[in-house]
Amino acid sequence: MIPTQQEAQAALAEADRAAARIRRSDKQFGAILLGIAAAYVAIGVLVALAPAVPGFALIAILVILVGALGGGVILLLRIRAYSRTGILQFTVSCAAFSFWNAMVVGVSSATRWWAPNQPTSHFTVSAVVAAIPLVIAAWLVSRTRG
Amino acid sequence: MKHPRHELDDLFGHPVRFSIVAMLAAASKIEFSFVRDQLEISDSMLSKQVSALEQAGYVRVDKGFIGKRARTWLSITRAGRSTFERHLAALRRIAGGAESVLTTN
């Protein structure tokens, strides 16, 4: 049976709604990226505190690492739908973060921004700078229409 | 000029099947329960429609376990995607008034 003009328009509208449902689901990747950024900055803060309270900082870092890893895995397993664009954005974001983080670590060491005579707060600043791509990526993912 | 109805696939004429394929066309993979919840249909209804699409070679079904929990993932095949894109193109022509133009000519 050939659809009428109105039926064809309704079907096209339904196809748009279906695509929007998937785009909304992709936004979960944004939450995961923000979670990684938060965990990374928190570790940066704790590393800065490490010389003052070593025992506490070490335990806290371990808790954050295990929590971030566990939380990330749970969130990834909870994703029930994703688009090719969504998973690509997530993968590229993680790769960009890894690359940028390596740059930040390299520059921080080479310029002696990280050195025994420097304030430990430099670790926190570096962690915040390193987390920038994750925050931008999370923002880009969350502003996707749908 | 060929009438757009020739590009329509009867399998997509069913509204639930159309919605399933429209979601799969926008996705890489979707879990069975997500489609069921979004389309507000029963498990059996979704299974029936997915089986029809799978038999036509339009949809792929992958089953797996995470721990003890079974999960079923649906994805669209290459044939399914190209057929659906042709179907959508035909619908766009009909929606744009191509049908009436061709009928009067």
Image (cartoon, coloured by chain):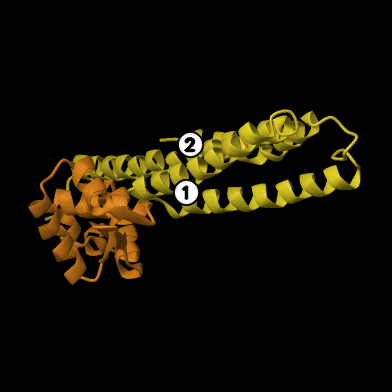
Chain colours: A yellow, B orange
Residue A116 in picture, x, y percent from top left:
87, 39
The residue nearer to you, when weighing B69 against B30, is: B69
Residue occupying image coordinates x 41% and y 44%: A75
| Side of B42 relative to B27 (left or right) | left
Q: Is residue A140 visible?
A: no
- Disc 2, SS: helix
Q: Quadrant of residue B68?
A: bottom left
* Callout 1 crowding tier (Cα within 10 Å): few <14, some 14–19, many ≥20: many
Q: Residue at x 29, y 44 (%)?
A: A12
Q: Which mark is in front, 1 or 2?
A: 2
Q: 10 Å neighbourhood of mark 2: few (<14), some, or many (≥20)? A: some
Q: Quadrant of residue A132?
A: top right
Q: How many marks?
A: 2
Q: Amino acid at mark 2?
A: Ala
Question: Whole-percent x and y of residue A52?
Answer: 74, 28
Q: Nearer the viewer, residue A68 or A132?
A: A68
Image height check: is B40 above or below B92? above
Q: Residue furthest front?
A: A55
At a point 16% along the width and 55% down the height, the residue shown is B13
Name the foreground residue: A75 vs A21: A75
Assign a secondary structure to mark 1. Answer: helix
Residue A66 place in picture, x, y as percent: 51, 44
The chain identifier of the residue carrying mark 2 reads A
> Where does residue B51 sit, x and y in percent of width and height?
15, 64
Answer yes or no: is residue A93 visible.
Answer: yes
Point out the image quarter for the N terminus of chain B: bottom left
Chain letter of the residue beneath label 1 in the structure image: A
Residue under label 2: A31
Check residue B93 in the rendering and tell me which mark sits there, or answer none: none
**Which residue has dot 1 on it?**
A86
Mark 1 vs mark 2, CA separation in Å: 12 Å
